[in-house]
Amino acid sequence: MKNINDYDYKKVLVLGLAKSGVVAASILHRLGAFVTVNDYKPFNENPDAQGLLEQGIKVICGSHPVELLDEGFELIVKNPGIPYSNPLVKGAVEMGLPIITEIELAYQISEAEMIGITGTNGKTTTTTLIYEMLEKAKCQPLIAGNIGTVASEVAEKATKDQTMVVELSSFQLKGIQTFRPHVGIITNLYEAHLDYHEDWDDYARSKINITVNQTKDDFLIVNADQPALMEMVSFTKARIIPFSTKGYIENGASIKEGKVFFMGEPIMDISQIALPGAHNLENILSAIAAVKLKGVDNQSIIAVLSSFSGVKHRTQFVAEVEGRKFYNDSKATNILAASSALKAFDQPLILLAGGLDRGNEFTDLIPSLTGVKALILFGQTAPKLETAGREAGIETIIHVHNVEEAVPTAYELSNPGDVVLLSPACASWDQYKTFEVRGDIFIEAVHKLEKRS
């Protein structure tokens, strides 16, 4: 960890705990800051806050009082999940008080170079592929960020010989000041999270923050199949490395005659790739570009891509029960992600979908529902999804209370040879704390069904 003195005697408010807040508060305390932690959960139900108090950190729990802004803080480190509409955050913005997320702190203390991955869809798969390829080539990678490992905790132990592979959400990137990955990736950009961001422009700007501090010595890997995205990043000082699944690119990553190419060099045949779904080619191309820039050999790339079949909660094969194959795609929290998963299968489908209502309709999902023979719905969006399903011509549409109930219902409606796919097209927060919890409940329900069968 870099021994920086930026925080000596600086009065800092850590707003919101969870894993990232706990780690950030502890690091800032060790760096000499005067830290106050504010978390919504009551103190007597908050072991994280209790632990920080034992370290000598001031803790305020039970609410986010706006009066905290009168205490002369010089900086707020905000949990990414707390929206900017929160009264305390809104007040801080109006005062001109700097607000960062923990990813900024991670960058400041890290001795390791960073590869940062963002985009609307494909972040987790791309992050995992890069990590696995670097690991195969013995490049000592570390994995962190939105994928589940707190970036500043990883950065604290990282050395100059290592590379941090960091998944980045728009929530995290909205709160940066100096953050600068040596290699940045934008997998794609579609409308999402408009319940958190002010509008599309705010969401897009947050994503594009990944390159705002990059220099001519850095690289930005970006989806050339989205001309609007290419225009958005045209300001960057980094060297742009484009990738395309639609046409050959001499100076980037692309596909030609059934082969994957990087900078004109053939890397491998598409037929060797184990990961299913055309949408995953975007992830594969951007991952290959990143690791080739780090000097990874083709054999390591081929070894990973010929065996890697996906990450948990992302078109993850769970089990086959009496000829029905069950797949967990709980990470599909928007329409595009669900559409991509649906297109990955040729077999008849039973689709399990629904969740948090963000105010959008599901018209854009209708063309992808062609192969769906039955729709099992839950959560706030069930009525809207039923409307979309009826318009797509699906005759069998059933409402259930939750994912656990949906699994045996899907089994009863299915036949041997069918696929049962959990791909909700919605966030989980109306019923489940995270999409991981939702996916784990699905997996558990499938295994219960498997045992009974």
Image (spheres, rainbow, N blue to C red):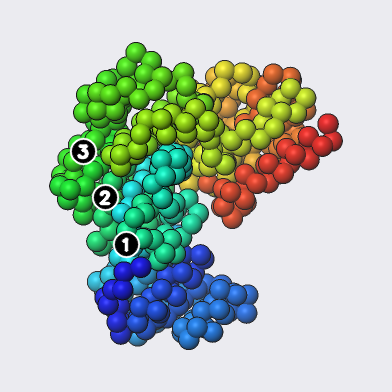
Circle 2 sits on which residue? 182
Is the C-beta separation of discs 1 and 2 under 8 Å?
A: no
Q: Amino acid at mark 3?
A: Ile
Give the residue at the far right of this rendering. Answer: 452
355 lies left or right of 98? right
Circle 3 sits on which residue? 240
SS category of the residue bearing label 3: strand
Q: Nearer the viewer, mark 1 or mark 2?
A: 1
CA distance separating discs 1 and 2:
12 Å
Q: Earlier in the sequence, mark 1 or mark 2?
A: 1
CA distance separating discs 3 and 1:
24 Å
User: Tag 1: Cα neighbours inside 10 Å, few (<14), some, or many (≥20)?
Assistant: many
24 lies left or right of 112? right
Q: Quadrant of the C terminus?
A: top right
Circle 1 sits on which residue? 111
1 lies left or right of 271? left
User: Tag 3: Cα neighbours inside 10 Å, few (<14), some, or many (≥20)?
Assistant: many
In this view, the residue in front, 385 or 256, is 256
SS category of the residue bearing label 2: loop
Q: Nearer the viewer, mark 2 or mark 3?
A: 2
Q: Amino acid at mark 2?
A: His
In this view, the residue in front, 416 or 275, is 275
Residue 305: % across, % down: 46, 30
At x 41%, y 19%, the residue is: 269
153 to 436, vertically: above or below: below
The quarter holding residue 110 reads bottom left
SS category of the residue bearing label 1: loop
Q: Which mark is residue 2?
A: none
Q: Quadrant of the N terminus?
A: bottom left
